Amino acid sequence: MAKSAELAKRAVKLGQDDPRRVTHSLKVGLALSLVSLFYYLQPLYEGFGVNAMWAVMTVVVIFEFHVGATFSRGLNRLLATVLGGAIGLGAHHLASLSGKTGQPIMLSFFVFLQAAGITFMRFFPRIKAKYDYGMLILILTFALVSVSGFREDKIFEFAHKRLSTVVIGSSACLIVSVIVCPVWAGEDLHRLIALNVEKLANFLEGFGDEYLRKLEDSDLNQDKSLFREYKSVLETKSKEESLAIFASWEPSHGRFGYRHPWKQYLKIGALIRQCAYRIEAIDSYLTIKFHAPPQVQTRLEELCAEMGMEAARASKQLSSSLKTMTTPSSATPHLEKARTAAKALKSLLKTTSWNHATDILAVVHAIC
Amino acid sequence: MAKSAELAKRAVKLGQDDPRRVTHSLKVGLALSLVSLFYYLQPLYEGFGVNAMWAVMTVVVIFEFHVGATFSRGLNRLLATVLGGAIGLGAHHLASLSGKTGQPIMLSFFVFLQAAGITFMRFFPRIKAKYDYGMLILILTFALVSVSGFREDKIFEFAHKRLSTVVIGSSACLIVSVIVCPVWAGEDLHRLIALNVEKLANFLEGFGDEYLRKLEDSDLNQDKSLFREYKSVLETKSKEESLAIFASWEPSHGRFGYRHPWKQYLKIGALIRQCAYRIEAIDSYLTIKFHAPPQVQTRLEELCAEMGMEAARASKQLSSSLKTMTTPSSATPHLEKARTAAKALKSLLKTTSWNHATDILAVVHAIC
């Protein structure tokens, strides 16, 4: 009982964190129910017979969370089915020329060669990134069409039915995924990049505003939540890359045109991660407790707070102008102010003989 | 012509970089040819008929590079086929109780409910990590068995044939992937972690040995290769995680028992990445040119070189004892020496009035 209550709570949280998960699940159910009509309605069933199951299978394996991912898998599957079917028919024809005993040997050889060759091609990074699924379906369709031909007389009909059911299944997925509450990978990428800049800003804000005022405080760990959110930025690279690939498959939508420069987002993402590495290094200093002489302490706090705040303001500006796709006009003055504060801080520390001054300087260095 | 020569060159390089890619491709070809025997040999074909294509399909979608990944997909597919088939038969029976017109409505409702429910379950992080593929096959088998039942009278035979062909296909994959040059994910993870420590050591070595001696040299960028290899460490997290999951599916092999503590590797991996973030921060200092007063310069070089070298020796010790699975006995003295050098360096810099001393101190801080 306690366990299932716990499970239900987690499920509710998953749904609340991103309600699109619930709609996605309902969409998959809808597409699958639509396609299963091919079994129930007599006129539709007469056209395809048991081959209707290819349509069901296509829906299950193609329907993904993002529109771009669904398009990527759907188009990969379609093209690979056409290509694999055509080569398979060719192989079947070639093999049938070599008589009853030669045919299975030839067919086995073709299947071996094609499977080994295409499996190797899947190791090419560019193919792996965009066409991995297509390559898989190419092997599959080739093997099914060419090998089935050994037993079935109506091999053209087999290939044709497989293709048309894949078309039906893919179309059902594409239409449902675009029409019913579409989840665009491009929009998610756009939002992710802006959010990552904001997370860095939160650290800088917390650094200037909170940390140095709490030097004597031992419960620094309390407001970790916002302050340490930047840690997730360190690990979004693969997510950004796959979103960018999905986005490149998506049709034009909203503010994003067909050839929106998705690769630029990856460059910004890499720069943000560079900053996050530095911040991670700064963060490791923050566990050290400094005890400055009182006459330095007040000025130190002021300057650190200013430096952090101004850097945070500049980052927030960048983040919001990313979101709204406008030029960040007011970021530069904030950056200038941050630099001025850093310079003042440096010269303050160089003139004091305080022992921990160099530690703080290292922090200043990492920020600017 | 030039393009295809370029392509061939790249293919050769891919094969040379990791010859296991070539054997993997041949293994896939072999498994597929083996399974296609079910079409060619009359006694085998009589048993399964066209259902033999499920075996072909299973091989294509299950065979992965690592043994653990193949096991994961194979066992997921098997279990999900059994479970999905059983629930599908149950749903078919329930639906058939409600008469000719009620049956398709009930079936549609069941398919919708099951697809939506399981698609939502795929969002649970733990299920996603280990059973994502199984969930997909569960939806698929349920839909195929329950919906096909509307048309086929021999639904038990359909479910039974689907299961036995999946068993045949999976077994072919598992046997070929374990017997012919197996590629163990566990071994790859083990090697990756040790290699990552070594990459950090290479930086530290290069830092002490090369960089400070070349202070006046402008061609620092030449030996980037080894020196900057650590950058790849920053981004291996997702690779480590998937290798650890695959490894947990693998049977006992070589030095790795059945319940080898794979999760510990992830902890070490996280610590290594922490170091790499620091090194990334140090590296950003190295573009600044220091011009120390001559009397300081020599001693500075000595101490920096020693600090780097000793830290590098300690890391190399750790890396090799990871590889050989022995206790790192000689790492501690090296670390002690590195700390002593760092202390000496700090006090040297504090006694000089040189302007850039604080910059160097920041570096010392980041290393120790």
Image (cartoon, coloured by chain):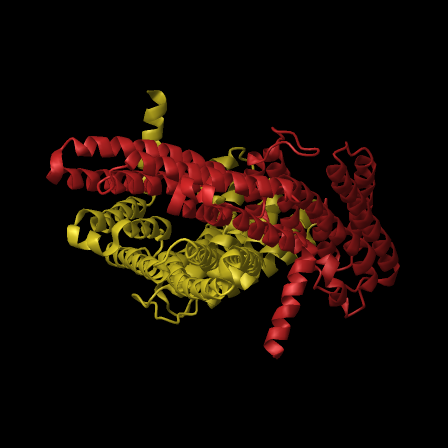
Chain colours: A yellow, B red
* Residue B42 makes an appearance in the image: yes
Q: Give the percent coordinates (x, y) of residue A101.
A: 52, 56
Q: Give the percent coordinates (x, y) of residue A323.
A: 37, 61
Tell me which corner region of the image, top left, top right, bottom left or bottom right, holds residue B142.
Answer: top left
Tell me which corner region of the image, top left, top right, bottom left or bottom right, holds residue B101.
Answer: top left
Q: Give the percent coordinates (x, y) of residue A225.
A: 45, 41
Q: Is residue A143 rendered to the left or right of residue B68?
A: left
Q: Extreme front residue here?
A: A100
- The quarter of the image holding the N terminus of chain B is bottom right
Q: Nearer the viewer, residue A48 or A221?
A: A48
Q: Give the percent coordinates (x, y) of residue B356.
A: 74, 59
Which residue shows up at 67% across the image and 63% down it? B13
**Is A62 located above or below residue B314 in the figure?**
below
Q: Is residue B192 rendered to the left or right of residue B219?
A: left
Q: Tell me how many marks there are.
A: 0
* Residue A288 makes an appearance in the image: no
Q: Is residue B241 rendered to the left or right of residue A68?
A: right
Which residue shows up at 60% across the image and 61% down it? A343
Q: Extreme bottom residue here?
A: B1
**Is A76 located above or below residue B93 in the figure?**
below
Q: Nearer the viewer, residue A3 or B115?
A: B115
- The quarter of the image holding the C terminus of chain B is top right
Tell me which corner region of the image, top left, top right, bottom left or bottom right, holds residue A294.
Answer: top right
